[in-house]
Amino acid sequence: WIGARRSLARAQGLTMDPGVALEASDDDDYSEERRSPGPQTTSPAAGTGASRVQCAATTAPPLRLGLSFSGGPVGGGSSDWRDGRFSDWTVIVGEKTYHLHAFLLARASLFFASHMDVSARAGPNEHGTFTRSSNLTKVLPESCHAAFESALDFIYSENQAAFEAPASKALLLLKIADILGIAALFDAMGKRIDSAFSDTAPLLLEQYCRFHIPHTDDGPALRQIRDGAVELIVRKFQPFLANPEMNTAMLRLPAEVLADILEADDLLVAGEDTVFDFVAARAEAVFGAGSKTAGGGGDEAEVSAGGDRQSSGGASDCSADKAVSADGDLEELWRRVRWAHLSASKFAEALSMGRRLFRPEVALEALTSRVARSDLGGAEAFASLSPPPASAPPRRPILPPGVPPPTSTEIDFCFHYSHIDQFNCGDALRSQPKRIGDIVLRVLVFPAGTDTGVARGSLSVFLEAVPQSYWPRDWEFTNVRYAIACIRWPTGSGETWAAKRKSDLWTFKANRLDRGWHDFLSPGEINKYLGPDGFVCIRGSLEPECLGRTFLLNCQVGSNAYAAGEAAGSSGSRRSWAPRPPSSGVSSMPVPTPPPVPAD
């Protein structure tokens, strides 16, 4: 026992005097210590050496041996499938061959486990060897071949919970997991898709269309993703267009899928011009690819009435023909454009580019539908045409919840605002014109402010008269009281919409077409009025008591005077405190001192 105590002392780095005598009472104390864990009282007669040993044994840190493996690097090698060492199973995908490990494949995939079992049961082949390979070239859709390596990364990963896949491959990996029975990968990609679905729906739908075979069923999970993506694109069409990656994915969608999307009445767009621009970009992508492939001759290709695409040099453009045949339903996309509700400037642009991007028949249908909407004779006047002109209603308007639709004296205009650098100073947006009495008005908006000295980032809004050919040369609509409001979306539950509203009195005439405010919203204030999808809603209106002054019969009656509202001006007028640049490119019209308003 004494030897054991000394050994313990040496292990703890202490020294024990071999001449120290240990009395019998020490043994009794040790036994009592084992019987009772409480604190022990040491008598002075017990000896100082034993007390030091007991205290040191109680407080010293535990012994650490510091053992380490000295046989080489930890793990002895790499677990990456690209290594290929000790591989015992070959997988062929298209033109690529992978040397992999049967155990890992069978553990992760029901397909590989079943295939290996069948191969083992079949026994050796004619050469006396067992088949130890799988050819997935026809098992996986061709569009999934490039994503197979990402599936291998998941199978070989030591931490599958931390595996990340880009949104551009998420659905392809889900399809691979579904075919090969890789349950863990299917669950991981399902969570990845679900977490980012609202932001990546166009990418997911584009991936689905790449591997989907028409008139086949891909299963309930993939079908649910497809239907949900189409519905979400309809509800967020223009916000997705503002994202370059989503925009590109949408342009790649098959024509029949796009036709279903563009057919929706509730397609979220500020106006029909957005739909036209999207279809025009799709047509440019199709025909542009054909013209680039044709070689740098520089001849502009056209679509003939018979549908054959020919170059101006007279030679047949075979590459362009392939582009047209690859997207034979492009005309169906043009027919989804609601031409009657296109702005005048956009419609003129469509006619100028028509022969390059669509057939004359489409242009004729567009003109007919536009005339039929404005003709007072009604739709029956065009009933004899075949096919009859389309009478599609305008898209569902974008309004905050609870806001009533515009009345006959109100004009609504929405535009999408994604970031401050989206527009340049002086860029103008205009609403569709609306006739109120005889006057035709529209909302004029400068999202980044006018080039008249206003602070950059201000929202400038005006009400603009649109002259008509039948108006007299000296037309004017006197003392018309108008108002402009920017509608604020509710930000929380129970909150109602609100609006910032300004009003003014103005005489609209040939040299005074518009009136409004250069700083309707100050820089940065526009963020308070953005909707959840990034839309800004403006409502211009005329006061009902001024309705009688909107007719040419009465517009000359009374004084020609006008009263200027607070801080109001025309879009071309310059602020008195703003320095005039040497050459601004914007005509400045002087504003006379307003006389007093006559009593009504």
Image: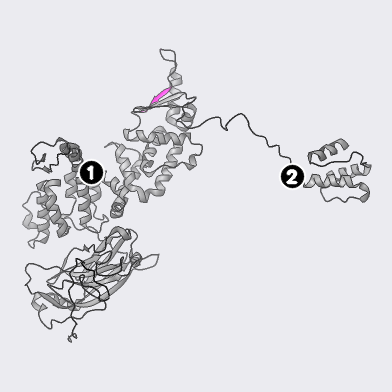
Alpha-carbon distance for marks 1 and 2? 76 Å
Residue drawn 35% across and 64% down?
527
Q: Judging from the image, what secondary structure is the residue with disc 1 in?
A: helix
Does dot 2 land on a helix, a strand or a loop?
A: loop
Disc 1 vs disc 2: which is toward the camera? 2
Residue 492 placement (x, y as % from top left): 40, 64
Q: Is residue 573 left or right of residue 495?
A: left
- Indicate which disc residue 256 carries: 1
Which of the pair 200/351 is nearer the observer?
A: 351
Image position of 365 (left or right of 237) = left
Residue type at numbered disc 2: Pro
For marks 1 and 2, the one nearer the N-term is 2
Percent coordinates x, y for residue 212 in the rendering: 30, 37
The residue at the point 45 percent across, 32 percent down is: 109
Mark 1 residue type: Glu
Would you say residue 501 is visible in this rendering? yes
- Magenta stretch, main secondary structure, is loop
Bounds of the magenta segment: 125-136
Front in this rendered view, residue 243 or 140:
243
Q: Which residue is mark 2?
A: 61
